[in-house]
Amino acid sequence: MATLTLKNIKKIYPFSGDDTKKKKKKKGDEPEEKKVNLQVTDKGVVAVQEFNLEIQDKEFIVLVGPSGCGKSTTLRMIAGLEEISEGELYIGDRLVNDVAPKDRDIAMVFQNYALYPHMTVYDNMAFALKLRHTPKAEIDKKVKEAAEILDITQYLGRKPKALSGGQRQRVAIGRAIVRNPSVMLMDEPLSNLDAKLRNQMRAEIIKLRERINTTFIYVTHDQTEAMTLGDRIVIMKDGFIQQIGTPQEVFNHPYNLFVAGFIGTPQMNFFDAQLTKVNGKYAVRLGDLTVELSEDKQAALAKNKVAEQAVTLGVRPEHISLAETGIEAKVDVHEMMGSSVHLHVTAMGQDVVLVVSTMNMTGAEIEALTSGSTVHFQFQGNVCHVFSRETGVNLEA
């Protein structure tokens, strides 16, 4: 199979003739500016910046981030569908910057399936093998094996228009895996499916990954897909990598405010707080509540020689608990979610979300959490995330 190495990859989209004229008319000599969150230089718009990543053989890597962050552009550069402006891309030990897509030993699954409507499922899956002049018996064997893996054997004689969205996506995946590629690229393959089908297809992709030995690079804006599928996640924003880590690492130790707010549902709560020391130990003070941080956080902050300062405190909704005393809050919205209730409250002049388990609550206690009611909440020191007010970087990093 294959390892991949991306070294200082950059993608610049040059200005069109009209853009160049407009740029020349600008007053002053401004080498670069910010426009639509992407960097604009005298060469053009920079869609991907300083992208460095080592991908191991058979690893499942997920590129995740909001729309326009550069993740699909990065995938298309790996595929050879976009030219690399700067940097080096290696598949194995081979530099492939100037290698044609067909010679990179990769397969790609697109968001819109990209199936040939006039061909049957069988012919769609066999098409790439026929172009390679693969023997007919081998084509038949590979197509039927892939169809069995994806549970679409019964649809081999049908055309795409007779299939559901989920079935078409299986065909698109089958067309890719019959080639036995070294690298499988997937560009938001589940985004056109409804919620139930997305859940089913996520499970199918996990099973598929266990049955075929290849390296996966998967692009999505859905953090649930990223957390459930990836061995490692690459979180991107405005063309830059924000953090690389396992799903648990980016959830438990977000590098900055963007990662903290992007990963996790509901989103992490952020407060203006004070990092202080009480009896020589770090604590956070929020209103009248002072919480001593856990030992691992004490060690990390001490190692970084962090001084007492105003900070942004992050606490996930599921890590906040109701209490008799603590920070007072008024319930605005009460969402019953079965095993938990999501409370949208106003506390200290801002919106806060709490996820409260109902497993050990009585019906009367649950009913008391209605809009307009007053509650108090607290949290423990081991769930606090302390970010620099100036840079947004996690002070434990």
Image (cartoon, grey):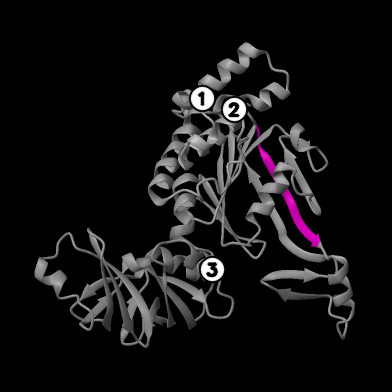
Q: Position of residue 329 (x, y in %)?
A: 27, 83
- Mark 3 → mark 1, Cα distance in angstroms: 45 Å
Judging by the rendered image, the residue that carries numbered circle 2 is 125
Magenta stretch containing residue 354, yes or no?
Answer: no
Q: Earlier in the sequence, mark 1 or mark 2?
A: 2
Are dots 3 and 1 in contact, CB under 8 Å?
no
Q: Which one is in front, 34 or 348? A: 34
**Position of 337 compared to 144: left or right?**
left
Are dots 1 and 2 in contact, CB under 8 Å?
yes
**Position of 377 compared to 95: left or right?**
left
Picture residue at 79% right of the left edge, 37% below the top: 100
Q: Position of residue 105 (x, y in %)?
A: 70, 31
Q: Which residues are magenta?
A: 2-13
Q: Report helix, strand or loop for mark 1.
A: loop
Picture residue at 52% right of the left edge, 20% below the top: 144
Q: Earlier in the sequence, mark 3 or mark 1?
A: 1
Q: Which mark is residue 258?
A: 3
The image shows residue 157, relative to residue 351, as above or below, that is: above
- Mark 3 → mark 2, Cα distance in angstroms: 41 Å
Mark 3: few, some, or many residues within 10 Å (few <14, many ≥20)? some
Location of residue 200 by image quarter? top left
Q: Report helix, strand or loop for mark 2.
A: helix
**Position of 332 compared to 75: left or right?**
left
Judging by the rendered image, the residue that carries numbered circle 1 is 156
Picture residue at 48% right of the left edge, 66% below the top: 260
